[in-house]
Image: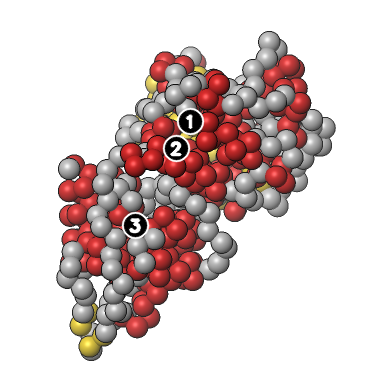
Amino acid sequence: MAVSEGLLPDRYAGAKPIGRGGMGEIFRATDTTLGRSVAVKVLERRYALDPAVRERFTREALAVARLSGNPNIVTIYDVGEWRERPFIVMEYLDGGSLEQRVRAEGAQEPGQALEWLEQAAAALDAAHRDGVVHRDVKPANLLLDGHGRMHVADFGIASAAGLDSLTQTGTVLGTASYLSPEQAKGERTSSASDLYSLGVVAFELLTGRRPFEGSSVAAEAAAHVTGELPSVCDVNPSVPCELDPVFAKALAKDPTERYGSCAEFVAALRASLEEAAGPTAVTRRLAPPPPPRLERPRRRGRAWLWPVAGLAALAAIGGGVAAALLGGGHDRALPQRPSVSVRTVTEPGTTVVTTAPAPPPTTTAAATTAATAPAGDPHSLNDRAWALMQQGDYASALPLLQQAVQALQGQTGDIYTAYANYNLGVTLVNLGRCSEAMPYLEASRALQPGRHEVQQAIHEARKCRTG
């Protein structure tokens, strides 16, 4: 259906259907005001007749708008209503979905699967920290951009903290193939429900099949409640049996027996795969050697004295010494927070109803996670990570830094933002994940331009990535 038939306001030209998602139809269009391709989700007419469903649809957009600063969550640009049909305008991603990838290729290479799962886990954990439960995690809602990065989409049946739930206990929502047992029984959902669904996605990515399959929707939903989890190596002999305990915990029938976060689950997957692979592991590049224990640099006036032993020594710049090392002029203001407009469009004009502030923009890409860090304020997380980096324990430092970077988003005057991004980038390089390191190092350089240590780290990351 085209815009000429009145589906959307004239601003969104040339709308063409590209799929369905949740309660809506999805179209690709051109935002003629901003000159960019967008995806527009329009509530189906049969649902639009129900005021409660229309409200739920709008809440989807508002819930996701709160998360739009996360690099692994689809960004919402606009929310409106046209001729009594609500619509959501979001970024258009041209890499397809994981569902399409698995359908075409089957089981994925473990290293690639882990990268996608880590990115999805980072996004879901961020949503959970903001009180949002997705409740429909499945490959069709995990979208890839043109660079192969993962973005979680379609929080269409999400419940957001602080909002009255439109879904009462006893109502089953979600997709049967990826449904948690508590969802299948109509019980209350939580972040553990999303973790379970991500576990099903992970099982499918690595084996090419879902752990529970049935001849009908009811049978498949029941299998999640009572079915016995198969061994991954029985489903796909190329997958090591060492993963069985990891999936047993992630897909436990009792939510309290699962991992504490999505990141923790994916970290356990990576650790088990690396243990099973032995010396070859699943990391695909050699990391620079770990740094020796280094003395903290001393400050002389406004001069910075840094070790010059190459990238390995750069890890000693950690935020644990930020206060002692900080000279003037290193704080940089980041852009003001954007807003997501919520509009009711009526002919012939447009009425702005309200404006919802979006989360702060971020210049970093999604972190990948190797373990779960204990809770703490971002400064403490960064300091503890720096101490681990001094010992060469990058695997343990990684989750601490990921949490610190996530928590520091929007704290524009905090030098720890620059340090945490720098340390995360260096840690990823030392773990051989150089492509992932670049956005963090670039973010650090943007906050403290002219620092030769950051530039040298970027140079080393580029050599590692292309070497």
Q: Mark 1 — residue?
A: 240
Q: Look at label 3 and name its amino acid.
A: Thr
Q: Position of residue 372 (x, y in %)?
A: 53, 54
Q: Position of residue 192 (x, y in %)?
A: 66, 43
The Cα–Cα distance between marks 2 and 3, rounded to whole angstroms, is 23 Å
Circles 1 and 2 in contact, beta carbons < 8 Å: yes
Which disc is residue 52 wearing? none
Which disc is residue 276 wearing? 2
Q: Look at label 2 and name its amino acid.
A: Ala
Q: Look at label 1 and name its amino acid.
A: Pro
Find numbered disc 1 in the image and state the secondary structure of the residue it sits on. loop
Q: Residues within 10 Å of mark 2 (few under 14, many from 20)?
A: some
Residue at the front extreme of this rendering:
278
Q: Mark 3 — residue?
A: 427
Looking at the image, tell me whether mark 1 or mark 2 is earlier in sequence order. 1
Residue at the top extreme of this rendering:
215
Quarter of the image containing the C terminus? top left
Disc tally is 3
